[in-house]
Amino acid sequence: YIVIIDLRFKAELPKNIKQIYDQIAFNNIEETEPYLLFKEHYSEAKKKGQKNIEAISIASYQRDSQEVDSRFVNLKYVEKNKWFFYTNYNSPKAKQFAQKNQISALIFWNTINIQIRIKAKIKKQTHSLNQKYFENRNPSKNALAISSAQSQEIGSFQDVTKNYENTLQYEDLK
């Protein structure tokens, strides 16, 4: 599952932002101020050793309960004017994204004291790109993603470990 954030809808970046870099890949990013500022701040934060630099808080709205829900995801890459992260199709956040395609996002890098706020539209990426991403990942990461039962209660740590080990042995991880 890939979700795309398109900054053209509304980007709110403070004018005094600095730079940024870690595990986020940049591919042909749009040559306009919000994207260039983001990459610049990312580079600066990476140079200063920012931990969890790829962490981005995403807030979405759930119509059924009429509540706003937030969670952290890992921003994987920025391509042109779109931001990509992955999530499970059956997760609560994926269901919220399907109900309402508008989100807000927040990034905070304490090493450079920068907060970036974004309002955007969100949509699924193609199945073929999802598969390509999955096939290029480490099989142990795929086993963890498959076995994790996102946002579900777990009985014990032993249950989690057993489910992961079983997935490593029996699932097609590529």
Image (tube, helix red, strand yellow):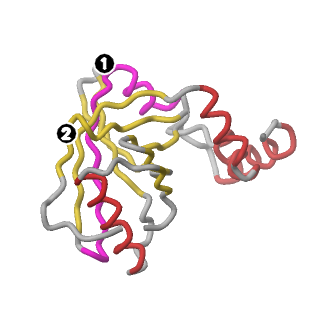
Q: Which residue is found at the position 50% from the left and 32% from the top?
A: 91
Q: Which label is found at residue 10?
A: 2
Q: Residue furthest bottom?
A: 48
Rendered position, 121 above or below 133 = above
Q: Which residue is found at the position 23% from the left and 67% from the top?
A: 114
Query: Which amino acid type is marked by label 2?
Result: Lys
The quadrant of the rendering that contains the C terminus is top right
Determine whether the residue tagged by mark 1 lies in a helix, strand or loop: loop
Q: Quadrant location of residue 150?
A: top right
- Nearer to me, 152 or 56: 56
Q: Which residue is found at the position 18% from the left and 55% from the top?
A: 13
**Separation of marks 2 and 1 at Cα, in angstroms:** 26 Å
- Nearer to me, 130 or 93: 130
Any magenta on residue 111?
A: yes
Rendered position, 163 above or below 115 = above
Determine crowd level at label 2: few under 14, some 14-19, many 20+ residues with C-alpha closer than 10 A: some
Determine whether the residue tagged by mark 2 lies in a helix, strand or loop: strand
- Nearer to me, 121 or 38: 38
- Nearer to me, 87 or 41: 41
Q: Is residue 136 left or right of residue 9?
A: right
Q: Residue furthest left?
A: 15
The residue beneath circle 1 is: 64
Q: Quadrant location of residue 146?
A: top right
| Percent position of residue 80, x then y | 40, 44
Rendered position, 111 above or below 137 = below
